[in-house]
Image (cartoon, coloured by chain):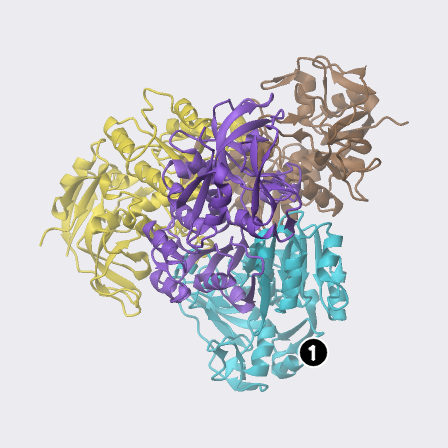
Chain colours: A purple, B yellow, C brown, D cyan
Amino acid sequence: MRAAVLPEPGEIEFEDRPRPEADADEVVVDVGAVGICGSDLHYYQHGRIGDYVVESPLVLGHESAGVVSAVGEDVTDHAVGDRVALEPGVPCRRCEHCKSGHYNRCPDVTFMATPPDDGAFAEAIAWPADFAYPLPEGVSLEAGALAEPVSVGVHACRRGNVGVGDRVLVTGGGPIGLLVADVARAMGAGRVAVSEPVERKRSLAAARGAAPAIDPESTSVPETVRSAFHGGADVAIEATGDPRALQSCIDAVRRGGTVVAVGLDDEASLSLDVVDLVDAELTLAGSFRYANTYPAAIDLIAGDEVDATGLIDFRSPLSAVDEALERALDPSVVKGLVERDPA
Amino acid sequence: MRAAVLPEPGEIEFEDRPRPEADADEVVVDVGAVGICGSDLHYYQHGRIGDYVVESPLVLGHESAGVVSAVGEDVTDHAVGDRVALEPGVPCRRCEHCKSGHYNRCPDVTFMATPPDDGAFAEAIAWPADFAYPLPEGVSLEAGALAEPVSVGVHACRRGNVGVGDRVLVTGGGPIGLLVADVARAMGAGRVAVSEPVERKRSLAAARGAAPAIDPESTSVPETVRSAFHGGADVAIEATGDPRALQSCIDAVRRGGTVVAVGLDDEASLSLDVVDLVDAELTLAGSFRYANTYPAAIDLIAGDEVDATGLIDFRSPLSAVDEALERALDPSVVKGLVERDPA
Amino acid sequence: MRAAVLPEPGEIEFEDRPRPEADADEVVVDVGAVGICGSDLHYYQHGRIGDYVVESPLVLGHESAGVVSAVGEDVTDHAVGDRVALEPGVPCRRCEHCKSGHYNRCPDVTFMATPPDDGAFAEAIAWPADFAYPLPEGVSLEAGALAEPVSVGVHACRRGNVGVGDRVLVTGGGPIGLLVADVARAMGAGRVAVSEPVERKRSLAAARGAAPAIDPESTSVPETVRSAFHGGADVAIEATGDPRALQSCIDAVRRGGTVVAVGLDDEASLSLDVVDLVDAELTLAGSFRYANTYPAAIDLIAGDEVDATGLIDFRSPLSAVDEALERALDPSVVKGLVERDPA
Amino acid sequence: MRAAVLPEPGEIEFEDRPRPEADADEVVVDVGAVGICGSDLHYYQHGRIGDYVVESPLVLGHESAGVVSAVGEDVTDHAVGDRVALEPGVPCRRCEHCKSGHYNRCPDVTFMATPPDDGAFAEAIAWPADFAYPLPEGVSLEAGALAEPVSVGVHACRRGNVGVGDRVLVTGGGPIGLLVADVARAMGAGRVAVSEPVERKRSLAAARGAAPAIDPESTSVPETVRSAFHGGADVAIEATGDPRALQSCIDAVRRGGTVVAVGLDDEASLSLDVVDLVDAELTLAGSFRYANTYPAAIDLIAGDEVDATGLIDFRSPLSAVDEALERALDPSVVKGLVERDPA
């Protein structure tokens, strides 16, 4: 089968690899759709993210869905032909984090497209059956692939304990920010504001319900939020990685409010005013990937509470994944999608 | 001013009373709309609910909204002309329940239309300003009055910790059951089933999104739910007071599931299988009135996530409140509303 | 090696079995101490508990600790000679309960001494390394074996959300009740009352700090608790399985209080007053086994916050396990312990 | 009656003031003991803390206990002669923070010894009865006065969700740090480390059970903690206000750990690494004063779980409060106490 690999930064090659076989507890999935994530672009451009370095040709892509083409001998709840979304991180199942339900914190996770583990820009992949989630009728493979970034949103909103009637600020109108905003509304947030400097993304946020949609380069985000929300946000979720956005979140929440940081940027550091933290009794929570989110994420997509496919700017066949990656580098692009080559 | 009082069961009289004046921390509200609740009907028919006995003429009605006509000298956040919903229970503010945020458990609460405290079937009422919540544009007084039963729904869903992707069963398609179902969906429940024996109410539940809407007299609720939800409800909320419905809830939830009892009936007792409770590690939670729900309830109504006015079967002027109570006794009626007499 | 098996009710035989070998992720443990639990006695007397029926000779015993004598090839954090306590239930690691941290609810658990899975009344046992917990210096093997009932106590107190300053009632002065009381104090409960009809156990409860220690056959438990605690318990934990005790718990808690049921008895059913549940906004929670408790349980034993060995009435060698079971049937016995045969 | 006032920084004068009278819901308390807090010293030295400026002679002292000498007409649960501890912050009881149980966040709180509200360095004080908590036999007035800093500890540990078996780091061995450590143990923390640069305080911490007690000037706190706790603290609580200590806390916790900031220092700001926050999924929580802690704090003192009086370095009569303040400025002093003048 064909797999697209990254031999070195900026270059994609196609390799012929043996078709994967299913271990006893695995399924083989013929990949149908894969979202392009910022981390794919970062590896593509730089060959590394922090300590994770691409040292041998790596298959990128971790937002994926497809069709089951083989099942391992112990697998009873999947059948050939089932349409599934794949959760890309499979933890050790044995450490204290795994046992206590926080498997996203497992230090021994296998995560697609993170060196040395291959991802889904390939014709097929073998994967543990319990990390392959059935898609209901009406949820397409490309929507299923986006259950991954929706999961990031579900986890971030859970970390922020978003509840009914809450006023929420989201900084960032990329795929994560927009999906966080959708999920927050689905969890009952009465009002969701989004700040985003790129006009095209900001308009998209507004069209999806952000009120207000704020340009942080021309307006004070905290002041706008405090005025719109009559006293501050209950929860603010930072989805850019920019420390200035995180500072906006801190300044925009009410006393006792919660700030969730989900955006990551290598160099980011924030000058945190400790008196603010204590005096306003804030909670500042990091949110890392997700755990126990896929069924809920797929439900939100199925119920149209989250418009995942509305993020997609373009689709590209696997055989043109190199062009797709180049195109996705444009900052006004929200989400590019790589699809199975036509037969 | 005129007030409708219950001098004895089955009889309503109108009294001329002095117009109330606002204490320093109160507002006077000209009542615009009052929902008729099952408890009003119970007092109307029987003159008592449990230990609460009508011993002198009582003004009924506790689901109310109106227009501020006077403000006390210490009140700074309300003005004459403001449209407000009134939270009918004002607690002591001093006991451990009040201090810890559970003021619905305060033993010294003043609660409208609960002997000896008068309710809102009157032209005006004086009420603590902090229990009068402004209604945003687009929320009518009749919708505002129904912030009360919506609050019951919000509190019950919070007690059940309803979250995104949850499968929820609601037993009962009266006003509380229907609003619980709406609120559960607004909090992210992926699927909400409702059981209700009265055909008209069951159809209304289905039209509002219940899937499935179950007739408990012809079908096994737990079996239907287990089949529809592939293994049991995450949360079941009982809104009838009928112990058979509560038993259905217990039988319908998955291992580790939560059952919330919000419906009340004088005689109800349940034969609880302790092995079920322990072995399935269930949580069974009572839900009593509400606390800290009004802003969220009004938000849900304003955002059309909860269709409160869709419950209203008929409207009646205050001067015909006796006929309205009689009409509301019909078991197929969901909600009757009493409105200010036309000028 | 020798193993004690139950071929039929009331009879124990010794079998020679092949010494177990360690799978890749397992350790072999030479069993040093095994507590006798009520469930062992129930199988011994009746050959079944509910739907679990002994159909072929079963090794009893699930409260165990011992010394590692072999390690599987993938095991890196255990070495031959390590002293460990064994958590007796190993879940599937794949279902939603396992993934979300509630592995005690896993339907596919392997649990020692529950048909058809053998227990620890044997010279050695092979067990997954991550369910074998190292014992610190100063914690004996017999104390380590009792990390199992301590875990039941930790889980029950967590289910009850016992916190600092809480007033707690525990019904039952057997091993679970006494350990629940210890754990509740260790979690900060200011006052812990214990009710227990058997004089010897009640005295033991009092000696361990129960105040008051109540005889439920001569005194009203709720009245005594309400008087001692000035208004009701915050949390009540039922550890007998007797529905009358559960009723006492319900009657003894304050408004908004929590009742945890941990005791199990085949026939138990309770006539639950639904009005009480709703009006007092109670929470009634089942507590089934435990998850993520062993490190904490061992810590509590090591720090002398829980006196596990103080429960032991007698010790018996494995070769006399039949006599030990007979002796443990005496209702005044709290805990019997089976030890490795002397070399 | 006599009251000690601060007319300008560094100076204490005594004024004759009219003896306070009890409003309907108040008690008058003859002050018996008042702890000297760092904030008293800060006002004494600088005449201000942040935006709070002493503009007219202010009575300092907010950690107080005494004997009820008069009760208002609506007060039913206090009697003359009762010994009580006074909670120094009385909130508005009406805002959303008060109603939801977080009254420590109330913006309209009256707080003793915070301009313009007087404190307890006086012979008597009138105070709302529900913020005067009875002291059980065996709890002295001076121990009762210290229910205030114990409350700070209870709230901080609750913010950190300290639980049974947790490994906890506390930075700072002043009164708050030492009491936080005691409370953490009382809530079940298996191991508590304390870092403190002043030798005398560090020794006191060790004597009270800190293991290890770390000198942050000669040793790396995170490395020491990671080694002692085999992988990081579950919770770290910062009680100095020094951003370097807060950084130590962040570096010392395990993945998914919680850092609570309770210490305050005017100038403190921290350079927060956002990648650390997100990648390790930390929670960073401010802790401001306390709410709903007094009964628990008094319980902990009564049960000897917290040794409050063991912090007291010296006692001084009210008439020598100026000398007492000077003496308390010595950095090796943990706690000074001001007592009623001898009759």
Name the residue beneath numbered marker 1: D330
Q: How many marks?
A: 1
Image spot of residue B278 (x, y percent): 55, 30
**In the rendered view of the protein, which quadrant contains the C terminus of chain D?**
bottom right
Instruction: Name which residue type carries label 1.
Output: Asp
Compared with residue C52, is residue C101 higher up or lower down, i.e. above or below? below
- Please identify the quarter of the rendering in which residue B199 is found: top left
Image spot of residue B330 (x, y percent): 20, 32
Residue closer to the observer: D157 or A255:
A255
Compared with residue D131, is residue C282 higher up or lower down, i.e. above or below? above
- State the residue lying farthest toward the left: B343
Q: Residues within 10 Å of mark 1 (few under 14, many from 20)?
A: few
Residue closer to the observer: B230 or B47:
B230
Which chain is disc 1 placed on? Answer: D
Residue closer to the observer: B12 or A108:
A108
- At a point 72% along the width and 13% down the height, the residue shown is C7
Helix or strand or loop: what does disc 1 sit on?
loop
